[in-house]
Every structure is written in structure tokens, then in C-alpha cells.
Image: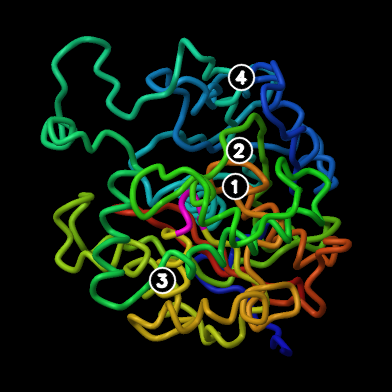
Amino acid sequence: MSIPARTPVLGERNAVISGIGQSAVGRKLGRTGISLTVEAALAAIADAGLTRDDIDGVASYPGAMDSSPGMAPTGVPELKDALRLKVNWFSGGGEVPAQLGAVFNAVAAVSCGLANHVLVFRTVNESTAQTAGRRASVVGSGGSRIGGAMQYLVPFHAVSAANWVGMYAQRYMHQYGLQREHLGQIALNARRHAALNPRAIFRDPLTMDDYMNARMVSWPLGLYDCDIPCDGSVALIVSRADAAPDLKQVVRIESIGSALHGRDSWDQREDLTTMASHDAAKMMWSRTDLKPTDVDSAHLYDGFSYLCMQWLEALGFFPKGEAAGFLEGGESRIGLGGELPLNTNGGQLSAGRLHGYGYLHEACVQLRGEGGDRQVQGAEVSVVGAGGGPLGGCILLTKDR
């Protein structure tokens, strides 16, 4: 489609993504979080044509934490010190609209003049940290009394996001006729695209028989419905839009969705066939004249295949309850040559769990025309959705114009 030029207005269009960077990505790389982060950050700064002296803001999600090994090994202060940055603004924390909250904070900072160029990063080294004797746990009790929402879930053996998402999926299946084979199309599509991505972790072919016969994790989610813990870091530079003429290549921010209208809970949402993704998507579309039919590529959270399906529905790519009919189209719907190319880098199901930021990186790659064998021809509009369950955020991006 042809995108009309616009004068920046108050809001997210005052910000652009001016540079992207990614570290090595793999299983059990044996590297520290700060090593991966510095590699990605320096790549993003160079990609933008900036220097470290130009960076006056830093943002990260969720900030450094040690409750889950490898989930967030590096925080803002550590990276600031490693790169000897002098910042006027910084942010790091988990109570935001899912993983994209750090990006939204950076957009707000540059839009209101608190910073000119904000370095945003997300780093994981779960694969190295989660050895056989030190597995991650969402319970995180450390032997003490379990508190918060978990105290009501753990007694019923609902100790993992796979359990919670599985129950949501069962409700949708019961109400709308979704089948495992439909979710399988998301997993198979991810693997096809990962085969074209030299950075992806799993690139071998995957068949529907492989998918259906894999071991069950938490019904109806099997092994290939679950994303792949890995080591890696993604960084991007969020800059003031009026600095764009001095930068090498930018991706424009059209609109963001950060709303949370329902309850921040896995089990108390009024309609259990929806998630916070529906709230965020509604807000995002309200802030732009573009429509779902204008989107050339979608990069949607597939921590579990069902979450990806929820994002597709929330963003309006098919009517409420019609996921089965949409996904039955398989490659003709969501493949590179289909109606809506989905997770062109392989997503987290095959490329690796970079916890939402791999999608941002890939969306920018597509809009810059740098996808190589997996490039979507004529890509001018991309959407990224991250998070699942009680939290979600989405962002609509366009090619520079």
C-alpha cells in the first residue's frame, strides 16, 4: 500500500526506531548477560550511525532479576556502566504492558523531550542458566510460604504458564471448535520460516505428524506449542523523529496499544476466550487510520501457539471465534506468500525465546527490506504484539517515508 507522508504530532509519531542490533543467539552459549547485551547494544548504536556519546537514555524490561535463572540477567545500571554512558533518563521494571513496555517508556521519553536517543534492550541467557540442577520456576518460593496469586494456583498443580494457557485454550476450543491441528499450523509455519533464518535455533523440517505425536506438556499444548529457552540479546535505538534526517535508516512508529481494561489476572477475566491482547489491540487501532488489511507482516508472541492465535484474533485478522477457519488455510494464510506472513524469523517456537524482542527486530528487518530469503515483498506496514494472558502490548510500525 502507499503510505501518505505525515507531519509528526504529539504522541508516538514523534519517535522512530533508528537502529537495531542482535547478539549471537543459541542454546547454552555459556556467556554472561552483560556480554550478550553489550554485543547487541553496540550493534544497534552502529546501525543507527550514532556513537555512545549520543545515547542519553536507557530502558529495559523487566530490569535485572534473579528469581528466575537467566530470565533477566542484566539491568540498566550494569549496561550504563559497561558502555560508560551518561544518561538523562532511564527506566527498568516489570509492571508495564508486557515486554514492549520498555519501548513504550522510551517513546514517551523522547516524545516529551527527556532524551534524544534511548537504547532499549532485552537480554536472556536462560539456556545457560537453567542447568539440570537449577531450573526456572514461576513459583519462586525458595522454600518459604508462597504468596500472591500463586498461593491459589499451586495447590491445584497449576504451577506453570503452560498450565494456565492450556486452560484458556481448552475454553476457546470448547466454545468455538478450535482443534490442535489448527494450533499446529502456527508451529509448522514458524519452522518453515526458521529454515530461512540462519540465526534460528531449530531449522529442521517439522510435519503435522511430528507435531501431533510429540509429548504432551499441558493439554492441549504439546512440545512444539512451547517456545525455546535460549541465550541472546536484542537492542534498539528509539530516537526523536526530528532527528531522523541525520540518521541512516529509520522505522516509523505509527501507533501503540498499551491498554488493560480487564483484570490483571490469569483466571478472573470476564471473558476467558479473550486476553489483555484484545484491550491493547483496540487501543492501537484507535490511534491510526490504518486497518488490519493494511498490514504486510505480523510478528506476534508465540510463547505458546495459543497466545499467537489470540493476537491474530485480537488484532482483527479474523472475526471473534473464527480462528479455526482462518488457520485451516495454513501456508496460504500465514506463510511468506500468504495473506498475512506471520513470524517470518521463526518466532519463539523455532528461532528462540528472546522474550518479545526478536519480533521487534524482525519487523524492522522486514520494513527495511533486509530479510533475504524470508523477505516479504513490498513490506511497508508491520505489527508486533507481545505478551499473553493478563498483560499485552502492541505496536504498529511503517517503512520510512
The residue under label 3 is 281
Badge 2 or badge 4: first in the primary sequence: 2
Closer mark to the observer between disc 2 and disc 4: 4
The 10 Å Cα crowd at callout 3, few under 14, some 14 to 19, many 20 or more, is many
Sequence-wise first label, 4 or 3: 4
Q: Are marks 1 and 2 in contact (CB under 8 Å)?
A: yes
Spot occupied by residue 144 in the image (x, y as percentages of width and height):
18, 11
Region rendered in magenta: 301-305
What's the residue at 58%, 30% (across, down)? 124
User: Callout 1: 10 Å neighbours few (<14), some, many (20+)?
Assistant: many
x, y percent for residue 387: 43, 52
* Residue 357 - label: 1
Residue picked out by circle 2: 121
Q: Which of the two marks, 4 or 1, is nearer to us in this view?
A: 4
Gap in angstroms between the C-alphas marked 3 and 1: 18 Å
**Mark closest to the chain's N terminus, 1 or 2:** 2
SS category of the residue bearing label 2: strand
* Residue 159, x across and y down, in percent: 26, 33
